């Protein structure tokens, strides 16, 4: 189950990047599980990674290589997370990137990597290694949909999006791909997301843009509250658009690029929710009137994570008392006698109690919809925050009780 | 679904207390939903209540009346939580206790009350009010099982337990009742629990014993991470056992009473988990080697709350990577390369990686059992903590998606 599979817009080739995807046999079901991206020399790179203390070997390797700021290839496998395999896991990640480097004749430390799938099982290294020559031969400019497909785990459809902007009179393309679909919770969501552009931009400037884009996108979603060991968001810029090299991410000329990257991150993040495991409702939680953004987020996340709110959503039950309850245990101080809560356009709580004008049929009508907005006014200040979440369904249990079988 | 319905031991009458239970019509299904307990004059009382900012009217009323330290009656309804009904909710709670006081001819401020059920709906006050005379006429010494039954919501069986101890050569009886079964998470669990004893003990001493009993019992369980608006744990002591009045809760002579109250709280708490909504596994999470108790609890709760761990448990899947992952995002600093994890007696993680001797069949054998222990050694210190939790099943979704229909 998943909702509202977005109509996939045409994906644009990005000068400086070629992709190839293959089923190398890590996934038992024969689906594509290995992605290679080759990049023009001097491609700049930025990245953000999981805050889980337990991290996958590929994450550790990427963090080691990031400071140099140059990328020439990316290799991603799905089906195995390469976590908790000790020195052998790191050896595996290094050997795979080394083999990519040898095949493409590029320095090893310009090869980045990511893995997603089951934690704690040994990655059968011979499978990706033997596939790398085939991948190299298959590299193409227009394989983005296959690229997005090869990184999927329990996702039901590939997630990819392209945008074009003009800077310095030069056409710039940005294409992003991402995968979910469980363990979705900041910081960051469980996700792999990669953004590719031909803009000319320094690595530090790209990093700043990424840092700022993540908060209102991948750090604003929650499926199940689990923060994974492999979360990776990376951006790569080939520079082939030949705009003036961007060094200041906050200069006026860069705004279209920043907006496009923000939009891509936000759309991909929302797709992760729509395609979340077992999801039947897409829920937008708007908290306003908070003392500060942190508290606004804390209240929104408390509602987003509550199993009782999530199951009420799954059952189309306007059991709004559970929303009020989850706000109450968020750990934020506010005056209960003042708060307002809306389900869609319908006010359900006014001054901390049931709105006397509220009728159950009104709430029911909102709950029957596939996309639901919950708005909460804490009446404590002017800060606000939006979080995207989902319901908790039988299918989530089904998917996760038998994930490995 | 629920597991291991404990074999109910005989329940002991407690001198100084009489109970009566009735179906007054708050529950649409005609089941018992109103409990009255009458108490000897000068019964002392202690209480602990939800830490949710949104609190039920009965909780507010009990907190107002607690400082006086004297109780003569308790009235509890199930089927409606009397939360978020504004001034009307408080008026309802006051009127019900006033009516009990009038009928029993006792001071109103010695009547305590609790409610459990749906949040935000108006409690139909005429139903309990009209039942109070009938309840008064039905008061009996041996109605503890019915008492435990009348406070149930989604519980599948009543929870009650009696113990006897001797202090100063006097026989002392302690009988406790409790209900769950969703919204179970500290602080406190969603629960109503009431403990009755004929010990002679001051209200402050009883409060201290209760404060100390709750941590290793009701504050050590989690079903779904939701902290309710109505959590109430109260203890009442009639003094009719005629032991020397206990003023110091830490004196040597009081140890048997303290132990009995601790045991009752712990057993009731574990029953709440066993009868948790949709529960098919009873899970004990032991964290050892932590820097301090707070961190030990934080790690245990992170594992207890993880939907991915809980669904793996439901599916009998020894997907231990999810346990490691949940430890990693608990927000506690430790050295990943040192930690050990055991499933039952089987070591699965050694020094942060899969134990080379671990075989999947061993983990599978443990996971097939109804009672499972997960042990985690953080190797960071000497503090430890035990938490009881459960799995997340289809039945949890079923129960909660349609709770009100």
Image (cartoon, coloured by chain):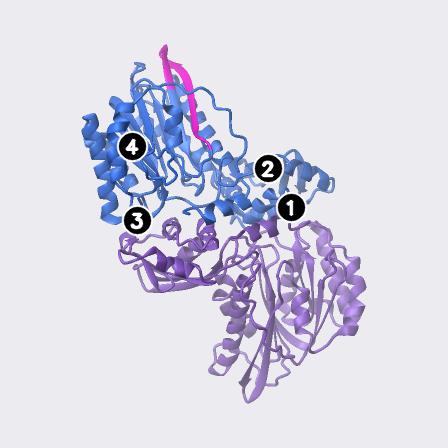
Chain colours: A purple, B blue
**SS type, badge 1:** loop
Spatial separation of the CA atoms under disc 4 and disc 1: 46 Å
State the extent of the magenta-drawn residues as a range: B157-173
Q: Which residue is mark 4?
A: B75
Q: Is residue B287 visible?
A: no
Disc sitting over residue B375 in the figure: 2
**SS type, badge 3:** loop
**SS type, badge 4:** strand
Q: Residues within 10 Å of mark 2 (few under 14, many from 20)?
A: many
x, y percent for residue A56: 65, 55
Q: Residue at x 22, y 47 (%)?
A: B87
Which of disc 3 and disc 4 is earlier in sequence? 4
Mark 2 vs mark 3, foreground winner is 3
Q: Which residue is mark 3?
A: B84
Quarter the N terminus of chain A occupies:
bottom right
Mark 4 vs mark 2, foreground winner is 4
Spatial separation of the CA atoms under disc 3 and disc 1: 42 Å
Q: Do tag 3 and tag 1 residues touch (Cβ < 8 Å)?
A: no
Disc 1: host chain = B
Task: Return the residue nearer the eye: A217 or A157.
Answer: A157
| Labels 4 and 2 in the same subunit | yes
Q: Do tag 4 and tag 2 residues touch (Cβ < 8 Å)?
A: no
Spatial separation of the CA atoms under disc 2 and disc 3: 41 Å
Residue B348, magenta (yes or no): no
Q: Which residue is mark 1?
A: B319
């Amino acid at each position: 189950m998943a909702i509202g599979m977005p109509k996939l817009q045409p994906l644009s080739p990005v000068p400086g990047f070629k992709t190839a995807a293959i089923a190398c046999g890590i996934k038992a079901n024969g689906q594509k599980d290995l992605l290679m991206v080759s990049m023009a020399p001097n491609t700049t790179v930025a990245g953000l990674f999981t805050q889980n203390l337990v991290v996958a070997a590929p994450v550790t390797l990427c963090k080691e290589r990031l400071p140099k700021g140059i990328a020439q290839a990316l290799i991603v496998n799905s089906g195995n997370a390469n976590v908790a395999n000790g020195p052998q896991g790191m050896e595996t990640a290094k050997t795979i990137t080394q083999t990519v480097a040898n095949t493409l004749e590029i320095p090893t430390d310009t090869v980045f990597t990511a893995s997603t799938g089951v934690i704690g099982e040994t990655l059968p290294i011979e499978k990706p290694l033997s596939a790398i020559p085939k991948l190299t031969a298959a590299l193409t400019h227009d394989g983005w949909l296959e690229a997005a497909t090869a990184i999927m785990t329990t996702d039901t459809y590939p997630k990819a999006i392209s945008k074009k902007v003009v800077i310095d009179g030069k056409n710039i393309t940005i294409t992003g791909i991402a995968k979910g679909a469980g363990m979705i919770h900041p910081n960051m969501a469980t996700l792999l997301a990669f953004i590719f552009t031909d803009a000319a931009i320094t690595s530090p400037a790209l990093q700043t843009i990424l840092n700022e884009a993540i908060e209102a996108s991948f750090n604003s979603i929650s499926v199940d509250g689990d923060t994974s060991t492999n979360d990776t968001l990376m951006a790569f810029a080939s520079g082939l658009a030949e705009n003036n090299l961007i060094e200041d991410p906050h200069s006026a000329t860069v705004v279209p690029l920043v907006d496009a990257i923000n939009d891509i991150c936000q759309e991909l993040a929302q797709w992760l929710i729509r395609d979340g495991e077992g999801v039947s409702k897409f829920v937008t939680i708007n908290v306003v009137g908070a003392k500060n953004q942190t508290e606004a987020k804390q209240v929104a996340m408390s509602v987003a994570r509550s199993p009782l709110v999530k199951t009420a959503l799954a059952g189309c039950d306007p059991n709004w008392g559970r929303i009020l309850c989850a706000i109450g245990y968020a750990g934020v101080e506010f005056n209960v006698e003042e708060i307002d809560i809306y389900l869609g356009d319908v006010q359900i709580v006014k001054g901390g109690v049931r709105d006397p004008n509220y009728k159950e049929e009104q709430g029911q009508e909102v709950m029957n919809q596939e996309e639901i907005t919950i708005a909460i006014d804490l009446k404590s200040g002017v800060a606000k925050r939006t979080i995207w979440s989902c319901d908790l369904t039988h299918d989530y249990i089904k998917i996760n009780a038998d994930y490995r079988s």
